[in-house]
Amino acid sequence: MVQNITRIKKGILTFMMVFGLLPGWAQHVIYEENMGTPTANTFIQDYTGWQDTTVLYIGNGTCDIRSSSASTGYGGASGGGNIMINDTVKWFQISGLNTTSSRPIVNLYCGLRKTSNENGSNFRVEFSTDSLVWVQLPMSDTLPTGSGTGGWYRVCFPNLPSHPHLHVRFYNLSRNDYRLDDIRITEGEEIVLETVATPTCTPSGGTYYEAQQVEMACETEGADIYYTLDGSIPTLQSARYLSAITIDSSHTLKAIAAKENMYNSNVMTAQYILIDTTSLVVLPFDMANNSESSKSELKYMPGFLSNKLGTSYADGSAKFESKNAGSASLTAHLDSSPSALSFELKGVKSGSPSSYSGIIFIVCESANGIQWSTVTTLNETDIETTDYTHFGDYTLSEDTRYIRWLLAAANSGNTQLNNIVITKRQNSEDGDDVGIEELGGISTPSPHPNPAQNFFQWNLCDESFNVQLIDLAGRKTRIWKDVRYGERLDVTGIAPGCYMIKGETPNGTVTKKLIVKP
């Protein structure tokens, strides 16, 4: 059988384990090597990650350790490095192996990956007791050939001699790809271990508006779970899961499960995005389908008024072009008392490295949209051209209802604005989140509950009115006609996130922020 070459049936193995006939690892492993976990492709002679440092490794200069994963074509794949042999002059040799054993049979096993037009006959393994006379070891398995039959297999080369100083070498008779991984020499036949079930987490990853208590579990009884929160691959040295984990900010959770006498599980990944509902994160130009080849023009959006802004960039940022210096601006109208402001800017060169110069970028606040006071003044020495620079938090006045970004002067180069964050004032009278109100809007009640899960109410007036739900890319997601006072507006099936709701009443139009949660 190709994928599982063990001759010991699962039922027999279980019986022996139950009655204590398989203590510990349940087999005597004479030698084992899984090629480590290299960070980049490395020549064999330069690689220092060997498990057994007492063994001499020999290879010609073109045989290398690859950093790609060993895949999961068989249960014992290490998921780290592997050796690529894709030429008739490439080979790999292990010397100094002590295979002395009281058992009559010593077998060599390895993970082997082949191209689809190979069946394993061109991959050779030989042994020698003096490094002069070499004897070929036959492969006990026949690998399939043809389209779609490439991939990883666990193969056996049986009947190694019992010897105190053995040499083993691997090479390729063709110019097609072979990759080698997880070499193991055992007394008798290898016992193929089962793999621990991949752990699960509750709640699953997603976007949330409050801290989550995340619990993890594994279907394999008695397995331990190890995890990381920084996106790195967990190991048995990572934090061990003992009880629910509090996730109160955005994290990428990765976890594995492990149990003695079993292979570690696959890695579970869950990304948690926590949106702080004390802040309004405004990405007004973050258009999901925007690209370098098809950029969208910046239009008036609820709560924002733009003046002479260029076409948006592919990342969704607002483009302030130097040719419009002195008039290129973006103004936001707030519907509640703000506390602080932050945003990100990036300079865009138009030619030589010195072309971005003479920039003056002014951010102002106002209570009435007429009289302005400066929040901050920035210039080219503040703004990077290689990546976004974060600015803030800037303290805002309690009566501020307008914020304006203005490219006041520019000799050359453009500037792009993104990731605006306006923080609400905790002691504001109405207790509402800071929102964006349409310019010229009227004072109105806020929607509730907010965040909304299944429905919300918006008692704008006694007469009927219309409501539009608009996402941050300006798309109308849902429309309600002839809404009455006290009527519930259904948001089931709406993707979680931050939206603007626009109400059209006989007395005027108003826009508020609404968060839809899972």
Image (cartoon, rainbow, N blue to C red):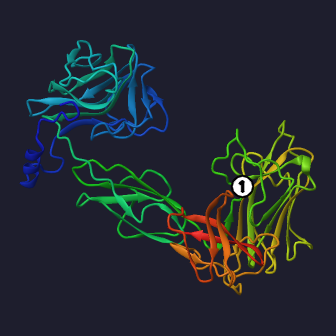
Q: In the figure, residue 88 lies in which quadrant?
A: top left
Give the residue pinned by disc 1: 285
Q: In the figure, residue 52 lies in which quadrant?
A: top left
x%, y% of residue 504?
72, 72
Left or right: 168 as drawn, with respect to 471: left
x%, y% of residue 486?
59, 83
x%, y% of residue 67?
45, 35
Q: Is residue 361 visible?
A: yes
Instruction: Name the residue nearer the viewer: 136 or 15.
Output: 15
How many labels, in total?
1
Q: Amino acid at mark 1?
A: Phe
Height in image: 180 above or below 430? above
x%, y% of residue 32?
27, 36
Height in image: 515 above or below 111? below
Left or right: 270 as drawn, with respect to 93: right
Height in image: 172 above or below 507? above
Which residue corresponds to the image point at 73% horizontal and 70% vertical from the top-left? 436
Q: Is residue 98 visible?
A: no
Height in image: 328 above or below 67? below
Which residue corresponds to the image point at 67% horizontal and 78% vertical from the top-left? 464
Of the 4 image quadrants, the one containing the N terminus is top left
Q: In the figure, residue 81 lies in which quadrant?
A: top left
Instruction: Name the residue nearer the viewer: 59 or 210.
Output: 210
SS of the residue at dot 1? loop
Local packing at callout 1 (Cα closer than 10 Å; few below 14, some 14-19, many 20+) is: many
Instruction: Name the residue nearer the viewer: 289 or 16.
Output: 289
